[in-house]
Amino acid sequence: MTLAVNILILIIFLLFLYIILKQDFKIFFLYGLLVFQGLAIVPSLIYIEQGIFISEQGRESYFVGATFAYVVYFIITFLILFLTFNSLKKFKAITPRFNIAGRPADKKIIYYIAIFTLALLFFNASQSKLPLFDSSVSRFTYWENSKFPFLNKILGNISVFIPFILGVLYKDNKFRSILILMLYFTYNFLIGQKFSPIVSGLFSFFLPIIIISDIRINFRTIFNRKIIFSFLVLFGVVYTIIYKRYEKTSPYAIIKIYDPNEAIFYRAFGLQGHLMWGSVETYVYNGEKQSYKFSDLSRGMHKLMDRFALKRRGYEQAKESGFNFTNGYPSILFYVYPTVISLIVHVLMTIIFLGFTGWLLTRFILHESYVLAVVMYQLFNWVIYAFTMGYFYKLKYMAVFLVCYAIFVVLNNSKKNIQLKRFIDND
């Protein structure tokens, strides 16, 4: 019976996805990483609620309504996003552009930003131990052991603004953009990154292309041969990489899963949604008291790991080195507040940090304010990271940017008003 209920919820979830896809593909794609999270979590929760052993928590699962809770959250999120975009249609964003000798220079500036950044990253990699060749370091410990670890704070873990720039420049020089994109992926593989740069990199690359284009979505555009073939090739590459890794490491031998195919299935369906299940089971189903500390959202993933993780030997060291679970949001909301307050907090943060910033990013892209678009995209990527992983300390950077942008808008409007007043007085 519980499986039938969850299958019905899955059908509702997929129908909702198709509706918003048809409604506005650009908004759908802009928040594509949230969609990707949903597509990963919902099947995982259905599997978990059938009753499995959750290795990361060291306990058996059962039906608690976590699938329903997540789908409700997901639907509310996208309804708020669409309402926010519709509400902002009448507003005009100020989108400053750079000029050199009277000519637009944004594209030239961001091109050199991408080249210089990638060269710097390769130089750092050439002077450092690489996870691909040295087992003493991993993707979690690469940066702290690299020659110039401070670059991580400046450029980010996988520097997703680089493929974003290449997407902006793709129309001008397709071959150059693809070539540099391949170098970007090569660099990330060298430092031990495998799955994340493929997903985030391709999303970042296609985002400006989609926003600028006049694409219309129907069944033919979604299920054409090129898209299906590309997806199968990408899936095959990723599956092969993970299979080889699991064949070598047997990460779930502790629960007697030795076959790589079984391990991949367990990782994909048994662990993607386990924090959501744990939070709903503990704080909604069983009614354990919440923390009521807004500050717990800052490093929400760590709070959830400390609460739910099976404390094996080396857990603290692994956490400090960068190891974490996945999909800490919206799970952390249930840890901090009761359901109703969680929903109110989520709606407010969605409007300000997801809706408004996403709208502003699209304005920068469409109005060819590419330098600001690159800055905004890096910040927006951190916002998405907060709303998927549960690390809300990342939002402080976007908050600072929004304050600076608001000051710039006020000063710019004041300047225009003064000029207009002088013109009227002189007339």
Image (cartoon, grey):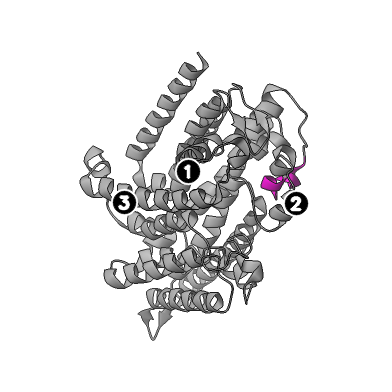
The residue that mark 2 highlights is 316
Q: Nearer the viewer, mark 1 or mark 3?
A: 1
Report which quarter residue 207 is drawn in.
Answer: bottom left
Badge 3: few (under 14), some or many (20 or more) residues near its Cα, within 10 Å? Answer: few
The disc label shown at residue 85, or none: none
Mark found first going from the N terminus, 1 or 3: 3
Residue 375 point in image, percent of width and height: 51, 66
Which residue type carries mark 2?
Glu
The residue that mark 3 highlights is 233
The magenta-colored residue range is 293-302
Q: Where is 420 relative to 220, above or below? A: below
The residue that mark 1 highlights is 260
Query: Is 81 in front, or is 146?
Result: 146
Quarter containing the C terminus: bottom left
Which residue type carries mark 3?
Val
Is the residue under label 2 in contact with that under label 1 (CB below 8 Å)? no
Q: Where is 209 relative to 147, above or below? A: above
Badge 1: few (under 14), some or many (20 or more) residues near its Cα, within 10 Å? Answer: many
Q: Where is 372 relative to 76, above or below? A: below
Q: Nearer the viewer, mark 1 or mark 2?
A: 1
280 horizontally vs 159: left or right: right
